[in-house]
Amino acid sequence: MVSCSRCGRYYDSSTDSNTLCFSCRNKVDTISANVVKIEDGTILLRQLLWLNHGCDLKYLYGDDGEMQCTKCKIDFKRFSAQEIEDNLTGSNIKDSKPVSS
Ligand SMILES: [Zn+2]
Ligand SMILES: [Zn+2]
């Protein structure tokens, strides 16, 4: 018998190496399913913003599901909405110098 790492309840872990009891495992599954659902909705908006925030397509990095702008240094996939706004409207753009390449 092993103690659940979430609720401390003892359970039979002989079937697998999971550290959560069955009821905690079900809860965690439900939570992560909801998170995926929320991300499904915002991923489209993030993609639109990434493609339309004003930078040339040559600055956009989109391999392997990434959504980054190498000019603004914004990660549209991982940054929070607030972080993206700060980067788009804040000092990053004012301070940016013309690219001299
Ligand atoms: Zn538990
Ligand atoms: Zn950009």
Image (tube, rainbow, N blue to C red):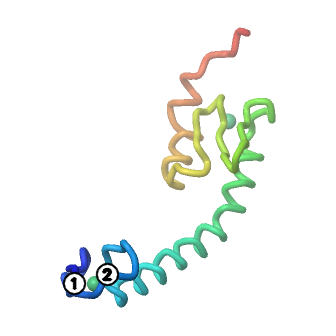
Say whether marks 1 and 2 touch (CB < 8 Å).
Answer: yes
Q: Amino acid at mark 2?
A: Ser
* Quadrant in which the C terminus appears: top right
Query: Farthest residue toward the front?
Result: 14
Q: Quadrant of ligand 1?
A: bottom left
Residue in view at x 60 percent, y 67 percent: 39
**Element under label 2?**
loop
* Quadrant in which the N terminus appears: bottom left
Up/down of 21 relative to 39, above or below:
below
Indicate the position of residue 78 as horizontal and vertical percent values: 54, 50
Q: CA distance from mark 1 to mark 2?
A: 6 Å
Indicate the position of residue 33 as horizontal and vertical percent values: 54, 78
Is the CB of mark 1 within 8 Å of ligand 1?
no
In this picture, residue 54 sits left or right of residue 77: right
Give the quadrant of residue 38: bottom right
Up/down of 57 relative to 4, above or below:
above
Q: Amino acid at mark 1?
A: Met
Residue in view at x 48 percent, y 83 percent: 30
Say which residue label 2 marks. 13
Q: Earlier in the sequence, mark 1 or mark 2?
A: 1
Q: Residues within 10 Å of mark 1 (few under 14, many from 20)?
A: few
In this picture, residue 16 sits left or right of residue 37: left
Say which residue label 1 marks. 1
Query: Farthest residue toward the top?
Result: 100
